Image (cartoon, helix red, strand yellow):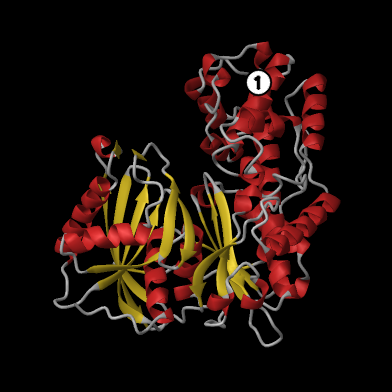
Amino acid sequence: MTTAHPNPAPLTSRRNSAFSSRLEHATPEQQDEIERLAKTFEVSDDKLRTIVKGFAEEMSAGLRANDQSCDLKMIPSWVTGYPSGNEKGVYLALEISGMDIYVCQVKLKGERGKLAINQYQYKIPDNLTAGEDISILVDYVADCVSDFLVRVGTQDLFVYPMAVSVGFAVKQTGLNKGTIVALEHGFDYQNGVGCDVVELFHSRFKAKGLAVKVVAMANDTVCTLLAHAYQHPSTRIGIVHSAGTNCAYYEKFGNIKSLENSFRNKNSDDMIINTEWCNFGSHKRWLPNTWFDRKLDRESNNPSIHIFEKMTTGMYLGEIVRNILVYLVDNDKLFAGSSSDGLNTPYSFDTSYMYVIEADDDTEEYKDTCVVLEEMLKIGPTTIADREIVQKVCEIVGRRSAMLVGAAIASVVNYMVEHGIGLDDTSDGFAISISGDLYEDYPSFHPRVCETLKALISDDIASKLSVGIVKHSRIVGAAIVAMMAEKMDPDVDMQE
């Protein structure tokens, strides 16, 4: 299957109609309450500019040193240089995500970014999630890779370069070096922590006789950037915004003070930096936290960290809405003061409900909203006013989330422009690639992000900026990382 990402769109989104908290079916008391909520969640222009300023400060601080007080960790990806779209070759990618294993073969055809992919998915059995030796799990992964190679066919006397992406916490110290610091997502192996990821996989692949060499580890946000960059070489920023959120961008070597001089002296190309922007606002109060945000954070399994993520992503937006609805019920402003077991259950209001409810344009009956409330959450019966109020709450929360994401992107863009990265007087512009279910599936999210982004950067920069929403990019991007690893070290012998 040959794939191509759609061309990134210029930053000229339609102007959203001005936000209004006006309700057609509510009582005066309900109207007053919604207006107070709208004001509570409002992000003023001054606050947006403060966020942009704070983000730039945190970026610079994170690049200087490994300072634990910095919100942005600014982690080097060890990927340097830019894909041109003319590279050719066959590369493999491996991703372990939860209980799923994805193996992918990408054939780069050059010709300005043409490629073809083959991909298979495998399930990890429950009995392989824990034990004494993590090699048991990796042996199973190796068997999956072996099966995949049989399915797609291999070339004799050729060792295929592969990049791996694992769902464990890894401390990466090089493109092909990194140790596991924590096993997550239900995995528990006594000897897992401290293992070198690349060596672990490569040794087990070699023991199985697989014609594969693990040449790199891949971060999903870096993969989003590179997958788009192969087909659109002007891409300089990659963003994942889904259940979690992160951003990667190209940085000049001279600005990355945390790199060892021995590595710095060998390279002059720009390097991709993983910002870990999910943590922005955790140490310093750059963000406009409300009582509802603080309640969610206190009751989460990771309080006081990942504050930006908790205010903007699919993991948490539905829970913010649920907390507001419960508050309205408790104050007799919604559902006649009656709740349900469904509404009272934490995280029962899935963020995807917001997509459906905001898109419900049946202003006479709000039938889709009724389905969510009465059939999914078992609330009812509900009135037209109830459904209209719930829609307005979703809009208030969703709008603030998109504005915060737009401000974060504007911060990165302005920082890059100020430091001469990506845009100069001779440049035609640069592209931003974005992936993630929330960004792709929430119809009003992208226009709101673009509106905020455009308001916070100069017109001449906005005219040169384009945004591409990309799908299925992570695993393809990992294969591009393998290609970049080979490109960075062309002396690597891939022959058996």
Residue 475 percent across, percent down from the top left: 38, 60
The single residue placed furthest to the bottom in the displayed view is: 426
**x and y, in percent, of residue 174 in the image:** 46, 67
Q: Is residue 14 among what the camera can see? A: no
At a point 45% along the width and 75% down the height, the residue shown is 230
Residue 109 visible, this angle: yes
Question: Is residue 258 shown left or right of residue 180?
Answer: right
Quadrant of the rendered structure where residue 160 is? bottom left
Seen at 40% across and 74% down, the residue is 485
Number of numbered discs on residues: 1
The answer to which of 354 and 97 lies nearer the viewer is 97
Judged from the image, the secondary structure of the residue bearing numbered disc 1 is: helix
Taking the view exactly as shown, the residue that stands out farthest to the right is: 46
Residue at the spot x=30%, y=78% of the render?
Answer: 89
Q: Is residue 341 left or right of residue 179?
A: right
> In the displayed structure, would residue 420 be above or below residue 345?
below
The residue drawn where x is 23% and y is 46% is 136
* Residue indicated by mark 1: 326
Vertical relation: 44 (above or below) 337:
below
Q: Nearer the viewer, residue 38 or 277?
A: 277
- Other-residue count near label 1 (Cα within 10 Å), few / some / many at <14 / 14–19 / ≥20: many
**Could you tell me residue 167's position as x and y percent?**
41, 49
The percent position of residue 20, horizontal first and vertical second, equals 78, 40
Placement of the C terminus among the 4 image quadrants = bottom left
* 410 on left or right of 167: right
User: What residue type is disc 1 on?
Assistant: Val
Quadrant position of the N terminus in the picture: bottom left
